[in-house]
């Protein structure tokens, strides 16, 4: 059975100059002991969202993450956040950080399973201010704990 890959040709390429100026010419580390990839490479996509103030008693938000390999759900995650946030930005930021950590794990898992990964993982979210702060380095992140988890 062949599953078509998603077409992200219409998405803008978010390659920024700061990505190389601050961190150098960084490339993804590919495990040297991973098996040789067989078959066609797969495209990875992640959807992430946070539901602010889901628990009326605790005030905690809920993180929801869905990982897809090509167009097939591969892994999903839903959990109450450990911290209480009073704004949507903070809870979305926590959810995005968790999603990025999981993306790294999924990419490594695919490589150890002998699956070639095509390009970068595309992550979709619904909070424009969060997405802008991830792509525009010159914008300040005012909350210290968010700035620390950003890097």
Image (cartoon, grey):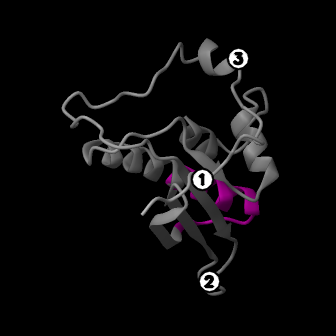
What residue does disc 1 label?
96
- Looking at the image, is 1 positioned above or below residue 33? below
What residue does disc 3 label?
17
**Alpha carbon of mark 3 to alpha carbon of mark 1: how far?**
22 Å
Q: Residue farthest to the front?
A: 1
The C terminus, quarter of image? top right
- Looking at the image, is 127 positioned above or below residue 120? below
What residue does disc 2 label?
55
Magenta residues span 82-98
54 horizontally vs 106: left or right: right
142 horizontally vs 76: left or right: right
Please state which of the two labelled residues, at mark 3 or mark 2, is closer to the viewer: 3
Secondary structure of the residue carrying numbered label 3: loop
Q: Residue at x 76, y 31 (%)?
A: 136
- Image position, residue 132 (x, y; %): 78, 41
Please state which of the two labelled residues, at mark 2 or mark 1, is closer to the viewer: 1
Is most of the magenta stretch helix, strand or loop? helix
Q: Residue at x 43, y 40 (%)?
A: 117
6 horizontally vs 11: left or right: left
| Label 2 CA crowd tier, 10 Å (few <14, some 14–19, many 20+) | few
**Callout 3–callout 2 Cβ contact below 8 Å:** no
- Image position, residue 129 (x, y; %): 80, 48
Which circle's residue, 3 or 1, is located before the other in the chain? 3
95 in the magenta segment: yes
């Amino acid at each position: 059975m062949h599953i078509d890959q998603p077409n992200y040709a219409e998405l803008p390429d978010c390659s920024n100059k700061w990505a190389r100026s601050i961190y150098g010419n960084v490339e993804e580390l590919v495990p040297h002991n991973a098996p040789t990839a067989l078959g066609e490479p797969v495209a990875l996509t992640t959807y992430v969202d946070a539901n602010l103030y889901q628990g009326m008693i605790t005030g905690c938000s809920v993180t929801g993450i869905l990982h897809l390999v090509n167009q097939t759900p591969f892994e999903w995650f839903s959990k109450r956040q450990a911290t209480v946030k009073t704004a949507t930005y903070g809870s979305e930021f926590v959810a995005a950080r968790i999603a990025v950590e999981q993306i790294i794990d999924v990419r490594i898992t695919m490589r150890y399973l002998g699956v070639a990964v095509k390009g970068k993982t595309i992550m979709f979210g619904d909070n424009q201010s969060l997405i802008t702060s991830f792509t525009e380095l010159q914008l300040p992140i005012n909350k210290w704990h968010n700035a620390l988890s950003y890097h």
